[in-house]
Image (cartoon, rainbow, N blue to C red):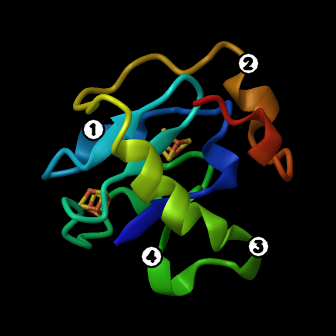
Amino acid sequence: TFVVTDNCIKCKYTDCVAVCPVDAFFEGPNFLAIDPVICIDCALCVPECPADAIYQDTELPADQIEYLELNEELCAQWPNITELKSAPEDADKWNGVPDKRALLEK
Ligand code: SF4
Ligand code: F3S
């Protein structure tokens, strides 16, 4: 499966959603999660993310490992998102800010 990681928090550009052929993304207040059961490992979403926030599970940076379980947990409680929407106004300001984990809203 592919995994949404820390830098998506407060960026949530949703460009990833527009290309996913199987609608594997689920939406929270300031983050998206990928359902590992739905994801077909096509990798199409990776280059679309302006925040470079999506990784294959086997290639997760060491400090992003917790996002594997987090994606699975969050997509079970959030609604499916299937279309591109506007990013938060201050998304660019948050792009690249390290360790946003504490800001994740559920
Ligand atoms: Fe969707 Fe492919 Fe990304 Fe998985 S890797 S979330 S199937 S676009
Ligand atoms: Fe998040 Fe990147 Fe998608 S910032 S919403 S994973 S395009």
In the rendered structure, which amino acid carries the disc numbered 2? Asp
Residue under numbered circle 2: 90
Give the structural element (helix, strand or loop) at label 2.
loop
Decide which of tag 3 and tag 4 comes sooner along the chain: 4
Callout 1: 10 Å neighbours few (<14), some, many (20+)? Answer: some
In the rendered structure, which amino acid carries the disc numbered 3? Asp
Residue 74 quadrant: top left
The residue mark sitting in front, 1 or 3, is 3
Residue at the location (19% across, 69% down)? 40
Please indicate whether residue 27 sits to the left or right of residue 69 in the image: left
Residue under numbered circle 4: 56
The residue mark sitting in front, 3 or 2, is 3
Disc 3/disc 4 C-alpha distance (Å): 14 Å
Decide which of tag 3 and tag 2 comes sooner along the chain: 3
Disc 4/disc 2 C-alpha distance (Å): 27 Å
Residue under numbered circle 3: 63
Disc 1/disc 4 C-alpha distance (Å): 18 Å
